[in-house]
Amino acid sequence: MANKVDISVHHVTRVEGHGNIRLRASDGKVEHVQWQVPEAPRFFEAMVRERSFEDIQTIVSRICGICSVTHSMAAIKGIEDAMDIKVSEQTDKLRILCHYGEQMESHILHVGYLVAPDLLGQKSVIPLVESHPDVVKTIIRLHRLGNTWMEIIGGRMTHPVTLKPGGFTVLPSEEKLRELKAMIEKAVPDLKTLAEVVLSLADKLPAFDRDTEYIALSGPDYYTFYHGDIASTDTDEKVPVQEFERVANEYVVPQSTAKWTKWHRDSYAVGALARFNLNAELLMPLAAQTAKKFGLTKGACNPYLNNVAQIVECVQVVEHGLELLDKLLTAGIKPEPVKVEPKAGEGVGSVEAPRGILFHRYAFDKKGFCTKANICIPTGQNHGNIQKDFEALAPQIIDRDQDEIRLMLEMLVRSYDPCISCSTHYLNVEFV
Amino acid sequence: MAKLKVALFDFACCEGCQLQIYNMEEEILDLLTLIHPVEWREAMSDQSEEYDVAIIEGSITRREDEKQLKEIREKAKTLIALGACATIGGVNKIKNNFEMDDVKAYVYGDDARRPHLNTYPTKAVGEIVKVDYNVHGCPINAEEFATIVRCLAMGKEPKIPNYPVCVECKMKENVCRFEYGEICLGPITRAGCGAKCPSSGMWCFGCRGFVDNPNVNAAKDVMEQYGKTIEDLQSKIVLFGTEQEK
């Protein structure tokens, strides 16, 4: 047993953005364990001021390359809430569908490219091209599906073009939607293969439970990423998204100065596992069956299982995506020209990013120029929970080899699928 | 032929441009026959001090990042700026239209005075070190990126379009966005994106930066013809083009 443990990971790899891990221990006692975020702040809330409502989603989409559809949609929903703009059922369905493409792309990127190397004992996906060519090709095909899916509806894979307040600039043709449907149907066997591969490696995910408050959108009657109110595993109360500030309770921690969030406890978690824990009974049959295969049930509180919940959600978006496509194609795509007259008001938009619940608040003057913005991002909400996990996990594993401890802490960070560039609220801190 | 050692470094940005490299899917496997990635934090745990080509994604907004960028420049034979944040500052430059103290106070409130919030006005990579090649766009066009990398590996000079987006937009037979009463930056913006936004029913945001010699007079004529003012034009340029030469 090592007498002293001293771990300092500068810029954890295979995560989006920049984060550091520090752990010091001696004689089996943890003296200091910290998750730090030195990402350069980018000040989006300040930058959207004075910009027209029709440019907001274009700007805030750039908060995050991986969840650009999510940020665009949160902004658009916030604008629509502020200006009392109602959208058609067709728009609603197409948006949900486009958003599913992003869930698929992001989850596959995370599980396939960023996490799989840990499970297979490699430093990146590149050696896997040689050692596991079939697995890599399966991941590539699924990743491309997610991208093509977003592109068909959003006009581009990253930073969508067609999404705007009130509806779409151009609608996908029925022919394109039929192509998409065929592509999704064809991907089902690949998804099953990927689930089997991850299942065969599931014992590589550390066993570590910590009772946690989970928060996600919930309702009305399906496994939602787009509609609903804010729900928590700690309460039956459902909070309208317009009141998100009383859930997030952003605060500054004296020893770290990065803004954290908390509701009923010291921290809470958001993301795939949170959505599963709140809405699992609404999963479609194949997704529910996938969860069952992994033994994933409501109440799971091992953060590493977020990766498994992501696989379950990939199946869910495929199943529900096909159902939405059927409905859209049966009804036929109808042209819906969008003309929005700006007006003064304030509103909130909330959607589930692949990595958890996201809130955007905006106020506009009567000409539609932004006067106020507040954005509360999922990784910001997970930050405190990662720290609390570290504090609980480190003493349990402190007797292990230093490299193993480091890997387990890195894997824990990765399991949250953090998106640190969404750094609106992050301070740039030089820690101890 | 020895493979080029390539390292990718990211600064202030959304990392969506390196995502376009992932998005090349199978084509990455082809590129890997020409290049050897030695450092790429988002994709690999490997790190390296030796590389032929450094790819820089993101803008520079802090002194310590400026220092790191200069060190990278010294080590790299060739330096590529990847995406609008690196080539022209991108959306990060919207910040420069405000006082830095105001920007910090707006986002961080009472904590804004803490010393670690040492942001400064956004700079593009080329404002600090010499850039050998720019891969334009927000996000980049992955095909253009692949072409530039292939050219480098084969010792050829890549050709970057130096004509406006309108040329590509006309080839797509799109109706001009000005006809819809919108303001489009196509006439002054460098092509190479395939007129992606106008083809999807949006105006051009100018994310690829201005062409080398934008025909300002022609742009003014277009604005006049459609009853728009230079102020209207500037309100659109500000998204990606703050501080670009007018």
Image (spheres, rainbow, N blue to C red):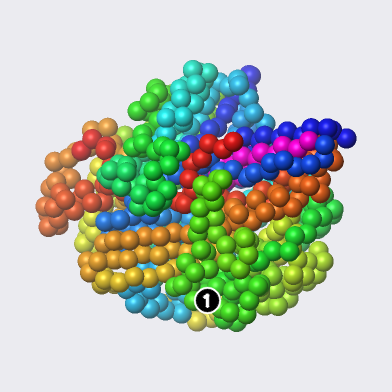
Is A373 located above or below residue B242 in the figure?
below
Tag 1: Cα neighbours inside 10 Å, few (<14), some, or many (≥20)? some
Give residue B244's quadrant in the image.
top left
- The residue beneath circle 1 is A239
Magenta part of the protein: which range? A13-26
Is A75 located above or below residue B128 in the figure?
below
Judge whether residue B31 can be spotted in this image.
yes
Q: Residue at x 60, y 82 (%)?
A: A221
Residue type for callout 1: Val
Give x and y (percent) for residue A292.
Answer: 80, 69
Q: In the visual, does B70 lie left or right of A394? A: left
Give x and y (percent) for residue B136.
Answer: 40, 38
User: Looking at this view, is A229 or B125 the one in front?
Assistant: A229
Q: Which quarter of the image is occupied by the C terminus of chain A?
A: top right
User: Looking at this view, is A197 or A203 the one in front?
Assistant: A203
For disc 1, the chain is A
User: Looking at this view, is B20 or A269 the one in front?
Assistant: A269
